[in-house]
Amino acid sequence: HKHQHQHHHHDTEMPPPPPVAGPLRSIEGWVLFVTGVHEEAQEDDIRDKFGEYGLIKSIALNLDRKTGQVKGYALVEFSEREEAQDAINALHGTPLLGKTIGVHWTFCRKEI
Amino acid sequence: DSSKPETVLDCICIGIITIAMAVDAAHNDEFYLRLYIGHKSQRFGHEFMEIEVCPSGKLRYANNSNYNNDKIIRREVCLGPAVVAELKRIILTSDITTVDDENWGEPPAARRQELEIKIGNEHIAFTCAEIMSLADVQNSPDPKGLTVLYYLTQDLKCFVMSLINLHFKIKPIPP
């Protein structure tokens, strides 16, 4: 059930995600690694952005143990590779709460 | 803009310098992380958790707790470069490189944690008694340094547990 695609402003100065030696599927799906997450982001902010590309199976939005704010990264799991790839293509280099996020594959098939 | 190359020779010189810097950075770019937290007791044997991130990006995780009937859980997975970059960022922003263990003394063998990091030109190795909470560090010889170590350890554990849990969908119980 895909919604209409929003138009995302891509930060053209941000380099594309570096190529990995083949993304690796996790035991139940495909896990994306999100960088540059705003310290006040909430799980719903992630869900709203990424949910457009498929059904999200899991989100991990870890907090900084000292400050209690978001540490700066998140993990988002999709069932299907295509959904995860769509999210990378659409969201890498776009703003979340005004801060540019990177969207990458988390795991890879070979050592870098 | 006076820094713009004006001749072919300028371009060649800039190119050579850039390559030299890249090679230098590549050699200094080797990253290694090891975190061990464990305790040994007569009742429960050796309960520990160990995390290792190799220069290749391979994450190795081992956990032995009395909840698993003494079967050590071991997992390995290759991390993408963005994940390794974020680990480095977390380490560098923690100020761990400013910590000095000169006054720490020898920790007990039975209850300790070890943190070893190779990042850029720095090689850090800290060993101390297992820090269960911030209250533990207040009466120590170096509350400030041990507090930095405590928070970094917590952040690294949290990060790696999320990676392991999502990739393998297991819920190991950290000691």
Image: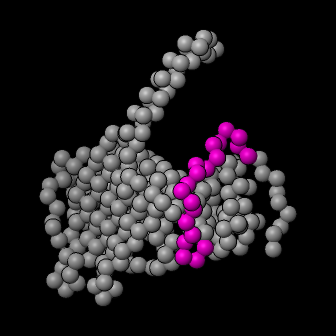
Image height of A98 relative to B134, above or below: above
The part of the image, by quadrant, that contains residue B75 is: bottom left
- Which residue is outermost to the right? A4
The part of the image, by quadrant, that contains residue B175 is: bottom left
Image height of A55 relative to B56, above or below: below
- The residue under the point 63% across, 63% down is A42
- Which residue is outermost to the bottom? B69
Residue nearest the viewer, comparing B49 with A41 = B49
Residue A51, x across and y down, in percent: 72, 67
Q: In this view, does A71 lie to the left or right of B175?
A: right
- The residue under the point 35% across, 78% down is B73
Question: Is residue A72 visible from the viewing direction of this image?
Answer: no
Q: In this view, does A18 lie to the left or right of B17?
A: right
- The residue under the point 82% across, 53% down is A7
Q: Is the magenta stretch mostly helix, strand or loop?
A: loop
Residue B22, x across and y down, in percent: 46, 33
Question: Is residue B93 visible from the viewing direction of this image?
Answer: yes
Residue nearest the viewer, comparing A33 with B97 = A33
Task: Reply yes or no: does residue B155 show up in magenta.
Answer: no
The quadrant of the image that shows the N terminus of chain B is top right
Residue B102, x across and y down, in percent: 18, 47
Indicate the colouring scheme.
Answer: one colour
Q: In this view, does A47 lie to the left or right of B33?
A: right
Residues shaded magenta: A10-29
Residue B31, x across and y down, in percent: 38, 49
Image height of B55 relative to B65, above or below: above
Residue nearest the viewer, comparing B42 with A33 = A33
The number of discs equals 0
